Image (cartoon, coloured by chain):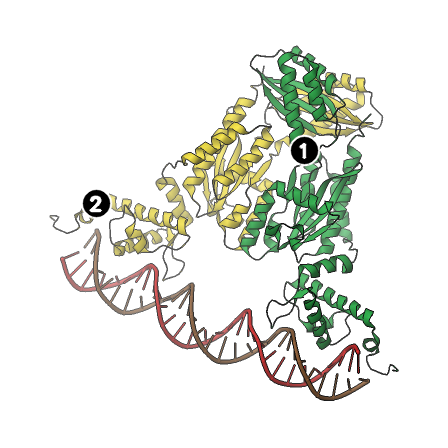
Chain colours: A yellow, B green, C red, D brown
DNA sequence: AACTGGCAGTCGGTAGACTCAAGTGCCAGG
DNA sequence: CCTGGCACTTGAGTCTACCGACTGCCAGTT
């Protein structure tokens, strides 16, 4: 058993090492396929760094990887392409931490330094930013009001019998709703009512405030209408807003126009998107590949998610949607960078409940 | 010259009538092509109602129409397809007024009866509605603040050193912006300052109000910051918001994924969209076909526009974007219906300046 | 003069045969 | 256990022939 072979390294590789080589083969296949979208053959892989064996050996490794479900052959005389399981292994074990280029980091930083305007605008533009940092479509789910408390309630007369209810919450968001009354309301009566309502509701969350206002018995009709409307706001505030960035990226990612259509169609259903992202996050994942998210129509897609953390819990999310053969490293670092930056800004802005 | 021919109508058609027949031929070609996206041949046209001549005659008419630039042949042995000029003639002279089905009318009515929430939400959802009424992508451009006047100014403390400026305008819109101060501001000082600022600015439009507030000399630092921020709001309010509905419709309209990508890419540039729609409206058109709008990348598209009229002038717009072979009748009636309905709602809501 | 049927001519699109290149599986040998 | 060599498979590309859908033109009819 003396190592007199011309390929000693190959000869002495113990079993454990073999697995490592297979991993290297898998990595080579995935990397190559991500770049070229073409089935990759054993010759290509043999040339990859970390794989110091002949193409014949690679072939047997690839056959094994196929048996184990990491690769598939589109047809007999073609190279291999990764399965979802293959991508999964790549993401979990092989993908290096992945750092964005300095240029991109700088771009993100500059973006967040320049953003003015309020949360909605920031989120909207962040989704565009994300889609420009990567070749994928981006989604940003706005944090729900959650436990934000009422900071101010105001009634503004807009026209005869038309009054605008404006509620400011502790997270800096403003909800408005117009109310129509049968009788005209005097300017100073409105102000008085507004003050009373504010006194009743301030400091509580929207739903509670609505109840308190209803019970406060201030001005018969008005308080009732305001209470009802605040309850509406509370309900509406729970359904998170979704911002979509760079939908045209989808048309770059997929060949078939039919796929583009169906994926775009899904992105239009905001509720689905929110549920999907939350699901993935709840399962503790940051990547969902192919059918992992259990949503059939997106079987050819992968989703990369990063939470936006405000205060102590995940309340929003940013995501990237691309083909399963997406560049996970790039996508992950972009999503993480933007979500971190977003979290920081939002934390800085939102008040801490009590002054 | 007694009409003893078996085809008397054909025989006695004077020159002017001939034109009418050509128009009928053109109409048949356009209608058919809109429906099938396939070059249409003389045999098909000959069978169309209103064209009571043989295919040979139709052929010579089609040749004439091609000479005049209304039709083209993709290749020698194929049928004809309309040119932009052909579509234009169709739209201007041939397209019947076009009424939406009762079901659609009812759907629109119901939609507008149910919409609650405020303008932004209404516009957003109107764009979705429009894209569902037709197989095309929809855009809605929000009315700019224009001459809306300030109805209320409020300063709300969110956190130490963090204050939210909330301005309510007479059209029911609410602008907010957070201000950061170096020193902490007392709750009641803020209220006092807010009241003073409101007194200075109320009744003027945003830009004027900003100047007035700046000059009012209320509270040294605060008034200055508020004035600056209000000016920012005035500027931001001028750039109209664009809502895009049903982008996936684009993937249905075009065969080539490349076209889908580029058109989607253009839709993402909101400024371009706004300019385009305004341009078309300013030229008094409601349809722009192919290159008529002078925007090269959209040469394969047609745009249908309808103004949203608030008070006395066009301040917003709804539009539909589809292939040049779109169903103009359907698109026009849908856009008109939604824009009319939208105008009415907005007029009802926006206060009339003075109480 | 206007319209018609008939006919030759023009192409695009499809189907089949063939070739080519990429890539595999297997095997004997080191 | 790995390697080079070899036979085999198969999609993709090319070429050809053919079919069908049109058109343009023309002589004939009313």
Query: Can the viewer see residue A75 in this picture?
Result: yes
Label 2 sits on a secondary structure element that is loop
Q: From the top left corner, tell me how far across and down residue A31 is, in percent.
A: 37, 47
How busy is the neighbourhood of tag 2: few (under 14 within 10 Å), some, or many (20 plus)? few
Q: Is residue B104 above or below residue A208?
A: below
The answer to the question of whether label 1 and label 2 lie on touching residues, with beta carbons closer than 8 A, is no
Q: Residue at x 52, y 26 (%)?
A: A345
How busy is the neighbourhood of tag 1: few (under 14 within 10 Å), some, or many (20 plus)? few
Q: Which mark is residue A14?
A: 2
Q: Residue at x 84, y 78 (%)?
A: B8
1 vs 2, front mark: 1
Q: From the top left corner, tell me how far across and down residue B343 is, in percent.
A: 77, 40
Q: Is residue A85 left or right of residue B334?
A: left
Label 1 sits on a secondary structure element that is helix
The quadrant of the picture occupied by the C terminus of chain A is top right
Q: Is residue A157 above or below residue B103?
A: above
Disc 2: host chain: A
Q: Is residue A22 above or below residue A97?
A: below
The residue to which callout 1 is attached is: B238
Same chain for marks 1 and 2? no
- The residue lying toward the viewer, choosing from A282 and B254, is B254
Q: Is residue A165 left or right of residue C15?
A: right
């Amino acid at each position: 058993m003396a190592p007199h072979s011309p390929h000693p390294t190959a000869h002495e590789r113990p079993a454990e090492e073999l697995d490592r080589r297979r991993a290297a083969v898998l990595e080579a296949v995935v990397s190559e396929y991500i770049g070229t979208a073409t089935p990759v053959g054993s010759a290509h892989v043999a040339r990859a760094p970390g794989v110091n064996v002949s193409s014949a050996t690679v072939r047997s490794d690839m056959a094994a990887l196929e048996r184990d479900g990491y690769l598939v052959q589109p047809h007999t005389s073609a190279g291999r392409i990764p399965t979802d399981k293959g991508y999964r292994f790549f993401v979990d074990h092989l993908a290096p931490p992945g750092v964005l280029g300095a240029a991109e980091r700088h771009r993100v930083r500059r973006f967040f330094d320049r953003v003015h305007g309020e949360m909605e605008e920031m989120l909207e533009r962040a989704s565009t930013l994300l889609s420009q940092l990567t070749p994928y479509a981006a989604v940003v789910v706005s944090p729900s009001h959650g436990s934000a408390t009422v900071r101010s309630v105001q009634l503004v007369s807009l026209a005869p019998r038309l009054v605008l209810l404006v509620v400011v919450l502790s997270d800096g968001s403003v909800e408005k709703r117009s109310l129509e009354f049968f009788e005209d309301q005097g300017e100073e009566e409105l102000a008085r009512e507004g003050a009373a309502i504010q006194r009743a509701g301030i400091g509580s969350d929207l739903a509670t405030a609505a109840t308190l206002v209803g019970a406060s018995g201030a001005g018969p009709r008005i308080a009732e209408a305001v209470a009802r409307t605040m309850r509406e706001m509370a309900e509406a505030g729970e359904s998170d807003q979704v911002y979509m960035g760079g939908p045209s990226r989808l048309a770059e990612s997929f060949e078939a126009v039919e796929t583009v259509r169906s994926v775009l169609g899904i992105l239009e259903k905001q509720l689905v998107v929110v549920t999907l992202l939350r699901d993935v996050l709840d399962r503790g994942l940051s990547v969902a590949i192919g059918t992992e998210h259990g949503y059939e129509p997106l079987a050819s897609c992968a989703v990369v998610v990063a939470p936006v953390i405000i205060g102590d819990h995940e309340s929003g999310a940013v995501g990237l949607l691309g083909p399963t053969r997406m560049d996970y490293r790039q996508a992950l670092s972009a999503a993480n960078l933007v979500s971190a930056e977003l979290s920081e800004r939002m934390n800085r802005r939102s008040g801490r409940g009590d002054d």
